[in-house]
Amino acid sequence: MSNPSEITVTPELLRAWGLPDPGDSKKSRGHVVVVGGSRRSPGAVFLAGEAALRVGAGRLAVVVPASVDAQLSVVMPEAAVHSLPEDADEPLGDGPRRTIESAEAVLVGPGFDDPDETRATLLAVSRLEVRCLVLDAYALGILPRVDRTALPRDLVLNPNHEEAAILLDRDPDDGEVDLVEIARRYDAVVNCYGHVVAPTGEAWDVPGGGPGLGTSGSGDVLAGAITGFAARGIAPAQAAVWGAWAHARAGDLLTEDVGIGFLARDIPLQLTRALRDLMRAEA
């Protein structure tokens, strides 16, 4: 998966890129929508949504199955909660539709557990005016069955190794996958374990993170962080790099503080700490 042309991401590089001015209200920091969830995995949406806010996005909405919307309304007081239609093939309701079209970035996939319903929901979302779309989890597994022209121009994929192989129609046991090929095939930015590749072939390597990040829900946090940066107005490739770096640095901070065994729910707060420390070092 290594690429000899990769640029190693350093704090100096990120400070040179900078972050958008936060402005003076939540509306100036971008609106994120997370579409996902299931009765089996409602927490994935929670983790992704919190991560988006922790990296500075100003507003959050989630669009989830009706079976879990009440529970998420209680545990996510910062988010507007909307329900998906009972039948995934039905059009989205007025509330979810307006919310998605008002967002700067939309994440689809965390917590979904049915391929057909995921595909139908992804297509329903993509029929709307979506500015930047981030795909994770089940939304990646069904992507080979989706026409790329049906998706928004700005697309970010956040696969793990197995999902990367699926995107190339390969067996996950066949060895390393070519992220450049994925980026070109899907005309998308790809982030896989800290290796970020743009469709142009530009590539970045984000060091750090460590084995502690290999915990249930960690990928949902990462996907939410990438989406949060995109919502703030950062271009897709740089948003993926920022998200991968903040996630890796959060893992390093937690490993230093508590050791291996931290939970995904511990990571979002450390995203904020990582960004604070990075930008404070510039002063």
Image (cartoon, rainbow, N blue to C red):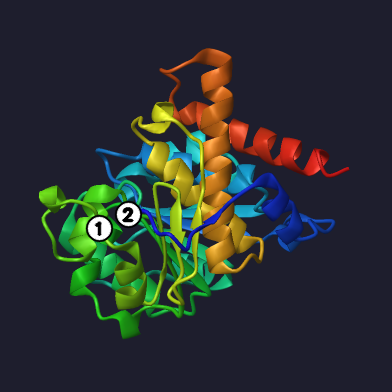
Residues at discs 1 and 2 in contact (Cβ within 8 Å):
yes
Instruction: Find residue 77 and report its image quarter.
Output: top right
Q: Who's the residue at 68% across and 53% down the image?
A: 14
Residue highlighted by disc 1: 177
Image check: 33 left or right of 233? left
Quarter residue 43 falls in: top left
**257 relative to 76, above or below:** above
Q: Is residue 212 above or below residue 278?
A: above
Q: Position of residue 268 (x, y in %)?
A: 56, 35
With 45 as the anchor, is 50 left or right in this view?
right
Q: In the rendered view of the protein, which quadrant contains the N terminus?
A: bottom left
- Identify the residue position indicated by label 2 in the image: 1
- In this picture, residue 180 sits left or right of residue 20: left
Rendered location of residue 181, percent (x, y): 30, 70
The residue drawn where x is 52% and y is 40% is 247
Question: Where does residue 218 sit, x and y in percent of width and height?
Answer: 41, 37
Viewer-side residue, 196 vs 5: 5
Residue closer to the observer: 43 or 66: 43
Q: Secondary structure at mark 2?
A: loop
Which amino acid type is marked by label 2? Answer: Met
**Residue depicted at 45% across the width and 80% down the height:** 153
Quadrant position of the C terminus in the picture: top right
> Nearer the N terminus, badge 1 or badge 2?
2
